[in-house]
Amino acid sequence: MSTMFRPCRSFSSFTFLFFILLSGASLIAPAFVRADASSPANGGSFRFVPRVHHLKNGLTLLTVDDPYSPTLTFQVWYRVGSRNETNGRTGISHFTEHMMFTGTKKFPHGALDRLVSEVGGQNNAFTDYDFTAYFENVAPDKIDLPVSIEADRMTHLLLKPSQVERERRIVLEERRNDYDDPTQKLVEKVYSTAFAVHPYHNPVIGWEKDIQHTTRKDILHYYKAHYMPNNATVVVVGPLDDAAVLNSVTRAFGEIPRGPLLRSRIPREPLQHHLRMTVVRKPAMLPITMMAFHAPNFKSRDAMPLLVLTQVLSGSRSALLYQDLIYRHPVAVDAEGSYDPMTHDPGLFYFYAQGLPKTTPKILRRRLDAVIRKVQRTSVDPTLLALAKKQILTQFVMNQESAFGMGMMLGMMSADRIPLSYLTDYVQRINAVTAGDLRRVARRYLVPKNETVGYLFPTGGRVPPSFSRPGRIVR
């Protein structure tokens, strides 16, 4: 059953820091390290060796031999997500993800989950703005099962009408459950207000009316248009023999024909020139204020300063938001923020505060504004800045501990076509961020004309706070 991920992505943005620029049939990428290597905060290097292969039909294969892992992860990443959807058919990426579990002739409905479970494995899938991914985590000697499953359902989905209607009911129930929550509703409204024309305006799960009206024909067309080897990356991480994995994947996927890739005409979000506001009034325990600002993605030189600024504002109990709103001026029970540069298109830098019962959203906003002004006018304390960098780089290494985490990193980078330089320069660029950089980006981006404010006014009831970001939905 689909659930929303929490304020930051389940794997924080700095885990997704690896993509190999593909040129030639096969190459060895620069090194990356496991967490037992020297600390990146102290200038350490990273070591693990991904190998990249291209099949003739356009499929990309990334492998990492991790002999220390007890399991192997097999993942397939498709470069299609809700940003590729059109008006009237929002949610079709997620709907299609559901249908990928409804059966082929080789693996009838229910067989896929049962077979993976019988070998002690795990399988699932998730849909996000920029991509859709499927994975199986199994014992290394069971790799033939996920290879067979993923190659088969890349092209042989049955899409029975009865199954379409069954999954429609499930997706609609997920939609209602997820967004009946008042905090979810607030986040949804902030995003739909901040983005006027770009598809990030729409929730990944889709609008209810569109889910109701999506037909089997729509799903079949979408499946055939995007599920093809030249729009996919296979990632395999764990104890493996690279040549054996290449042979296995080539045998299973190599005969699947490449298809014509659609050029999605995704509108560019125009510059925002004035403050936008939205209000939610629903039964809830606590008031919430959310403030969101348009921000660049990984392509910008401001990405790293913004990432550090997020940590300075909300990365720990020492962070500025927590110190101000919880301790010095106790008006809130929680104050956090998020910025993810690892997106295909520019996204949002946002933070929020959940107030004490008698606090109003406007009081919360005044305190949040006061923290912004402080960052814009004065230099961040050197001790706090150093702590923020250390926390980011420590997490950067820790998130590589598992084969699954490494696979997620590789897949995300491949799906969003993030260049190798983002990885190789990461530690250096984080360490190079200065207090002046934080002041500069705060003055540039955290300004009213670039801002969308969302207020949640409780109207009674006892719905507990459960702030969640929009985006990835896991099956």
Image (cartoon, rainbow, N blue to C red):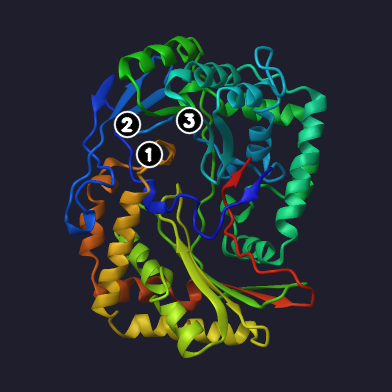
Q: Secondary structure at mark 2?
A: loop
- Residue type (three-letter) at the residue carrying disc 2: Asp
Residue 185 placement (x, y as % from top left):
69, 63
Q: Residue furthest bottom?
A: 329
Q: Can residue 414 be seen here?
A: no
Q: Residues within 10 Å of mark 1 (few under 14, many from 20)?
A: many
Q: Can residue 387 be seen here?
A: yes
Q: Which mark is residue 13?
A: none
Query: Which residue does the numbered mark 3 point to in the structure image?
Result: 75
Q: Residue at x 45, y 78 (%)?
A: 321
- Residue type (three-letter) at the residue carrying disc 1: Met
Indicate which disc, 3 or 2, sits on the residue closer to the N terminus. Answer: 2
Q: Is residue 158 above or below residue 84?
A: above
State which mark lies toward you, 1 or 2. 2
Kindly check if marks 1 and 2 are in contact, taking CB atoms under 8 A apart as contact.
yes
Classify residue 175 as left or right of residue 451: right
Q: Secondary structure at mark 1?
A: helix
Query: Which residue does the numbered mark 1 point to in the structure image?
Result: 406
Residue 221 placement (x, y as % from top left):
67, 26
Q: Is residue 229 above or below residue 315?
A: above
Classify residue 7 as left or right of residue 61: right
Residue 166 placement (x, y as % from top left):
80, 33
Mark 1 → mark 2, Cα distance in angstroms: 10 Å
Q: Which mark is residue 66?
A: 2
